[in-house]
């Protein structure tokens, strides 16, 4: 299981983030699964990830990364200058996660929530578990 991104499928911000990653992941490094999907639920169980996690999750080389660490590690494989954000990992995790937590806590209020996950187009569907 390499390079899997788990996300909240009913969160508008998370959905837009996944679309953003897909457009910039030209080497198709990442596969995706929403927390709400059967595949997402299986991965959550496999890695003993708490059900109440409020974070994007990156599974990379059988390790889990949460919050700002997941977001910044994802940037490493994106095209153009987005790779530079990976360097922000030098900022201490408590500081990075503090700001990540503000966004995570307010994401439904600021960006809204959907009734169900967005269905990907047929060409993108193969990237979803």
Image: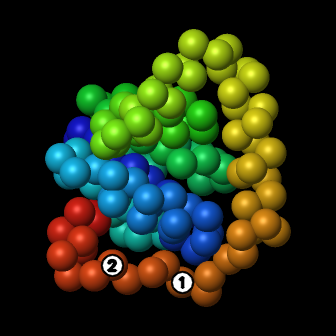
Give the camera-side residue of 61 and 107.
Answer: 107
Q: Is residue 124 above or below residue 115?
A: above
* Quarter of the rendering containing residue 46: top left
Q: Residue at x 49, y 20 (%)?
A: 87
Q: Where does residue 105 sit, x and y in percent of width and height?
A: 79, 53
Element type where label 1 sits in the image: loop
Which residue is labeled 2 in the image? Answer: 120
Judged from this view, the residue extending furthest toward the front is 81
The quadrant the C terminus occupies is bottom left
Q: Where does residue 111 sit, x and y in percent of width and height?
A: 72, 69
Colour scheme of the rendered structure: rainbow
Element type where label 2 sits in the image: loop
Q: Residue at x 24, y 39 (%)?
A: 2
Q: Residues within 10 Å of mark 2 (few under 14, many from 20)?
A: few
The quadrant the N terminus occupies is top left
How far, Cα to Cα, is label 2 from label 1?
A: 12 Å
Give the camera-side residue of 43 and 129.
Answer: 129
Q: Residue at x 23, y 63 (%)?
A: 127
Q: Residue at x 50, y 30 (%)?
A: 85
Task: Answer whether residue 47 is visible to the viewer in this image.
Answer: no
Q: Is residue 99 above or below residue 7?
A: above
Q: Is residue 54 above or below residue 86?
A: below
Give the camera-side residue of 4 and 95.
Answer: 95
Q: Where does residue 128 sit, x and y in percent of width and height?
A: 28, 65
Would residue 23 be found to the left or right of residue 67 on screen? left
Would residue 106 be found to the left or right of residue 43 on screen? right
Which residue is labeled 1 in the image? Answer: 116
The image's mark for residue 66 is none
Please identify, in this view, whether the residue under mark 2 or under mark 1 is nearer the observer: 2
Judged from this view, the residue extending furthest toward the bottom is 115
């Amino acid at each position: 299981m390499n390079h899997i991104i788990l996300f909240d499928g009913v969160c508008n911000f998370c959905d837009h983030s996944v679309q953003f990653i897909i457009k910039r992941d030209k080497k198709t490094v990442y596969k995706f699964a929403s927390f709400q999907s059967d595949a997402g639920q299986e991965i959550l169980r496999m890695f003993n990830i708490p059900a109440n996690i409020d974070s994007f999750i990156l599974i990379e080389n059988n390790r889990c990364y949460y919050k700002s660490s997941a977001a910044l590690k994802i940037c490493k494989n994106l095209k153009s200058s987005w790779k530079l954000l990976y360097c922000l990992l030098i900022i201490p995790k408590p500081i990075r996660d503090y700001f990540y937590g503000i966004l995570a806590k307010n994401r439904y209020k600021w960006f809204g929530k959907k009734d169900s996950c967005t269905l990907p187009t047929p060409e993108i569907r193969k990237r979803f578990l």
